[in-house]
Image (cartoon, rainbow, N blue to C red):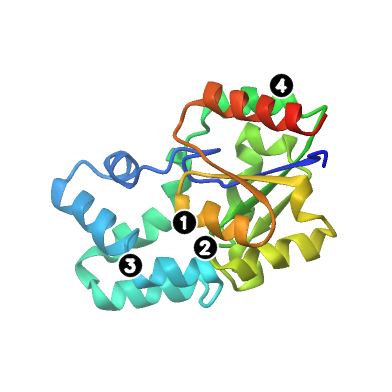
Amino acid sequence: MIMKYIVLDMGNVCCRWDPRYIASQLTDDKDEQDFLVQSLFGSFQWKQLDKGDISINQAIQQLTKQYPQYGSLIEYTFNHWYDFFDVIDEMEQFIIEYKNDYDFYLLSNCSVQFDNYYQSKSIFKYFKDYYLSAKHHMVKPDKAIFLDFLNYYHLEGHECLFVDDIEENVQGAKAAGMKGYCFDGDVNKLKKYMNILKNESK
């Protein structure tokens, strides 16, 4: 079967998700950095945002109530963390190289904040569309989110390659009938895998 679509995760595939680095850009204070990494980016509220169960304002209010000493930092972080969610240049070049042969989709566990920043990231202009977990109230690695993605865009699983940096998510995609590749940061290895798939379809 010929592959027609490449479906990419966002964090550590399209953009560098490094909470420690992001925290270091938001504050010079080591204790505040530790708080952001452990208690904000690692919070229950952050996961709820990915699932679309709470709003950004609700998350800010809940975390501020829980950690009042960090109230201003919490609000500032929610408004600026994505300024340091840097595009992975090698992946952008990969998309440019393959965009005439495949349609690219994003499938990511992320909040609706994506709408605030995606236009500032050059990589996203090459995508046909963006499937955000928060808008569908499902998250990876649940097989259901991949089935819903395929149904939403009227795609066949065997025509899609899903690329994620977490093996558990890749397995979820495979369970839904998609091809899957666990990305380790090496775009050349991904290209070699693409060539294997291309030869298999001949």
- Residues under numbered marks 4 and 1 in contact, where contact means CB atoms less than 8 Å apart: no
Q: How many marks?
A: 4
Quote the CA–CA distance across marks 4 and 1: 28 Å
- In terms of sequence position, does the residue under pointer 2 or pointer 1 come before the other? 2
* Three-letter code for the amino acid on which mark 3 is drawn: Ser
Give amino acid for label 4.
Answer: Glu
Where does the N terminus fall, quadrant-wise? top right
Q: Nearer the viewer, mark 4 or mark 1?
A: 1
- Reply above or below: 20 against 34: above
Q: CA distance from mark 4 to mark 3?
A: 37 Å
For numbered disc 4, what is the local secondary structure?
helix
Q: Nearer the viewer, mark 4 or mark 3?
A: 4
Residue closest to the eye, 17 or 158: 158
If you read the primary sequence from the N terminus, does the residue marked by circle 4 or circle 3 appear first? Answer: 3
Q: Which residue is mark 1?
A: 168
**Disc 2 target residue:** 141
**202 vs 149: above or below:** above
Residue of label 3:
43
> Which comes sooner in the sequence, label 1 or label 3?
3
Place of residue 166 in the rendered image (x, y in percent of width and height, measured from the top left): 45, 49
Q: What numbered label is drawn on residue 97?
A: 4
**How many angstroms separate mark 2 from mark 3 (CA)?**
19 Å
Give neighbour class at mark 1: few <14, some 14-19, many 20+ (Cα, 10 Å): some
Residue type (three-letter) at the residue carrying disc 2:
Pro
